[in-house]
Structures are given as structure tokens and as C-alpha cells.
Amino acid sequence: MHTVLGIDLGTQHLKVIFYDFEQKTIIASEAAALDLYQSMDGTAEQQAHWWIDALHQALSAVDQSIKDSVVAIGVSGQQHGFVPINASGEPLISAKLWCDTSTQAQCDTIMSNYGSADSCLNDLGNLILTGYTASKVRWFKEVHPELYAQMDCILLPHDYLNFYLTEQRCMEVGDASGTGFLNIRTRTWSEKLLSAIDPERNLKECLPKLVIENQFIGEVTRKVSNLTGLPVGTPVSIGGGDNMMGAIGTGNIKQGKVSMSLGTSGTVYAYSDKPIIDTQGSIAGFCSSTGGWLPLLCTMNCTVTTENMRRLLNADIAQFESQISSAARGSGGVLTLPFFNGERTPNLPNAKACIIGLDSNNCTPQNFLRSGVEGATYALRFGIDELQKLGIQTEEIVVTGGGAKSATWRQLVANICNAPVTVLDQDQGAALGAALQALAAFKNIKNKDLNSLTETHLSKNTSLCCEPQLAAVNHYQHTYQQYQQAVETIMPLYS
């Protein structure tokens, strides 16, 4: 038996899967929960050692014979996090995460130093938004100048796990495009943007090697082997951001497919063979990890919304599914704007969630829960529409993430977005994508040939796939417009 190990560092959990690529089956899957520190000012942080502890915990639950079968490892990780390390490799502060919205002032400073938001978008392909890594670096300089002076290297969350496993410092181009300081057209660092972050220091000296083509970057060290049971010398591929690895894990490496992740955050993204620059700034112009580009819309409140609603109403998963399936489409007029953690799209980092349309007849648990699902899905429907304006067609939506386990939610996606929804037999998203990327490196398969690899290892679960229903599609066209009008109405409150 031979396996590849996929590690996915999420916000709420770290997951490991062991994929037997000869039998085409996942033979072990374990996860460990992660804590999250959040405060009212938008701060969202984790300790990097929590990730290492979670990795040890997840691997400790796997039989040693399975760990002995690993021939290659790939790591996926939450994007945009900031892990500054000193010369000894020690993190200098808690890692600020993708969902940290406390650095809007630093975004404004960077844009002012650069010249303008328009020039940044035109030059680099992206705006500097709160949540991206760039503003976190500026924040570090302003708030912790003594520690900032000790910063030797800037890593992203998945980079830090790679560093732990191999002692190698590097950054993958797809994940790097979420920092804000990568020119996504040329796949090179922008010295002008780095200077806008800190005009007094050459931050390029703090950036690790940039890796464009998938390759092995190092091997599991003896120290890590002793602590985890992974075979010493096991090669580790470059890995990537969770969205980039999710694209591989959903077979989204050719045009026509759109992937939708219904996780803590919500994402909609598609493969393109050329850079996609959204002059409105709603669609992020990321690079893919497969040699192309990955235009993407991210919302900060997907299953965040449903978890908050479930907690409010003390509903378990079974009750949640029963309630949202029994409520009428449109939730009786109840409309949720799900901005619990602020929001990236639309760019409202200081926003709060709003529930509107309540009356004496529709104020029920069923409508509250379903309106949360509908609101989170409306926010992602906007991404489908924006991608279409940029020339990205949606022939099918491949859904993944925790929300995709709900049959009612899957059908809502099909109806609200008016597109067929596909569920894969191998519904492990980013973790499987990381494993398949490691397999590609093990078999010396280059990016241009990855499509044949994913077609070999991915298949549809036809019993879970669904088609849009005409009557529901027509209904949701109207309620989606109501949602858009409501967002426009509340924007001045939080701008």
C-alpha cells in the first residue's frame, strides 16, 4: 500500500487525509479543532504552535502502518495569514488571519503611499483589502516596532507548516497572490507595493523563495518524524492556499467549471488561462497553483452565518436541516445580510449582520435559519454574476465544504445560481487537492498535465447532484434583487 498525505489547515480545524492512489480511496481521515481569538475591533488571531499541536493530534489518531505508507505530502492552508518569524524560525507574534478586519487604516495608508487604488489595481491586478497580508505587515510595523525589527522572514500559514516539516522557507505563487504584494500578471514581487508598506525597509529581503511550478521543496526531518510518526525523508510538495488546493481537489483546472466552497468563509472561483482583472475590485485576481489564474470572490460569512443562527436557536445539525427544508423559499420575507465578521465582498470590514423583513407572521425559527442559508448563498451568487461579466461561464458548480453536506443547501445553490450543482465522491476539497498535488510531484506530472490526473482520481456522486428547478429559479431572481437592494441600503451605515 502506498499513500499520499494531504494536510489542510483551516480556521476551525486542521485535517489530514491519507489517500491510497493505487486503490483510489481515502483510507484514513482525522481532524483536530483549532481555537480562534477574536475581539470587537475585528482582530482574528491564532498561535502558530496551535497548528503544530493540531497536526500532532490528528496524526496521533492514525495507525502507524498507514503513516508508514506515505510516499509524499502536500499542505493546504488558509490564505492571507501573517506569520513573521525571526532568524531562528520562531514566530514573533500571534498569526493574524484572513478574517482579521482590524487593519483598514493600514490598507488606506498603503494605498496612499502607492498612489491610488486604481493604479494598484491596474499595476498588480488586485486592490489592497483588509484581510490580505499586506496591511498586516504594516500593522506589525506600527504596533510592534521592536519585534518588527527582528522579522527575518514573512510566511503564510501553509508556508509555516511546510517550514515545520522541512525547515525550508518558500512561498507558492497561488498563495502568494493573496498577500497583495505579488504582481499576478508577471508572478513577481512588487517592489513598489513593498515600499508602500514600509518605505524605510527593503521588505523583499524578508520574503522567502517564490515557487511557481509544483515541486518537492524538502523532506520530513528526523525531528518531525520522531514527533509525528511520518517517515523521515518523505518529500513535501510546495502546497498552496486552500482555494488553490480546493481547485485541484474539485477538478477545477480547466475552463467551464466553477467551484463553490461553503465553509467558514464562502468562495466562488474558476480557472482561467489568462489573468482576469476586475476593475470594480469585487473579484480577486489570484494565480492558480496549476499554471493559470484563479479569479475568486470571497465572503467572510458562510457557515459562520449558519453556525451563529443554530447557536441562537439551539438547533443541532438534524434540526437545522429539517427546519430549513420545511420553510418556504424566500423564508416568508425574512432577509439576512450575513455580515457577522464584517465583509470583504462588498468591502465593508466594519459591517454587522442585519435581519430585515420581520413581521408577526414570519418570525419563526424555520425562517430565521433558512434566511441565513439564503443570505450566505445570495452573497456567493453575486460572485457567479461578476465572473460572468468577466467572461467566465458557469456550466456547473462543484460544491465543497461543510455546507455542501446539506441537501437543502445544495438545492438552494442550484436554484439561486441557476446552474447544475455537482458533488464529488471524493468530497475532501483542499485536503484532497494537496494530496493530489503531492501525487503529481511524486509522479513528475507537470502543471499542464494535471487535468488528466484529476480526471483519473475524481468522480461525481450522482445521487447528490442536483439541477435548478424552474419555479424556484424564477422566485429567487426576485428575492436576490431584494437582497442586493438591502445591501445597497445598509452600506452607508458601515462605510
Image (cartoon, rainbow, N blue to C red):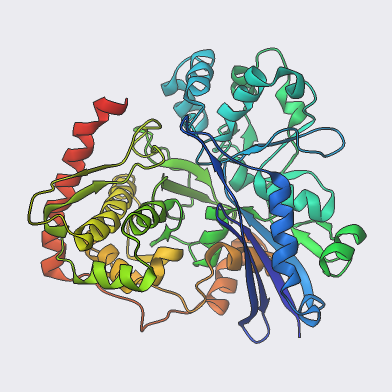
For the residue pair 287 and 73, the one nearer the viewer reads as 73
Q: Quadrant of residue 284?
A: top left
Q: Quadrant of the N terminus?
A: bottom right
> Is residue 330 in view from this perspective?
no
Q: Measured from the top left, where is residue 283 in percent x and y?
A: 40, 41
Q: Quadrant of residue 485?
A: top left
Residue in the picture at 33% in, 51% down: 380
Left or right, 481 with reference to 466: left
Left or right, 232 with reference to 419: right
Q: Measured from the top left, where is residue 212 in percent x and y?
A: 67, 48
Left or right, 228 with reference to 367: right
- Compared with 468, 378 (above or below) is above
For the residue pair 409 and 34, the one nearer the viewer reads as 34
Of all residues shown, which one is farthest toward the front?
314
Q: Quadrant of the C terminus?
A: top left
> Is residue 457 in view from this perspective?
yes
Residue in the picture at 50% in, 72% down: 427
Q: Quadrant of residue 437?
A: bottom right
Left or right, 257 with reference to 51: left
Q: Measured from the top left, where is residue 461 in percent x and y?
A: 42, 81
- Compared with 393, 356 (above or below) is above
- Compared with 140, 4 (above or below) is below
The total number of labels drawn is 0
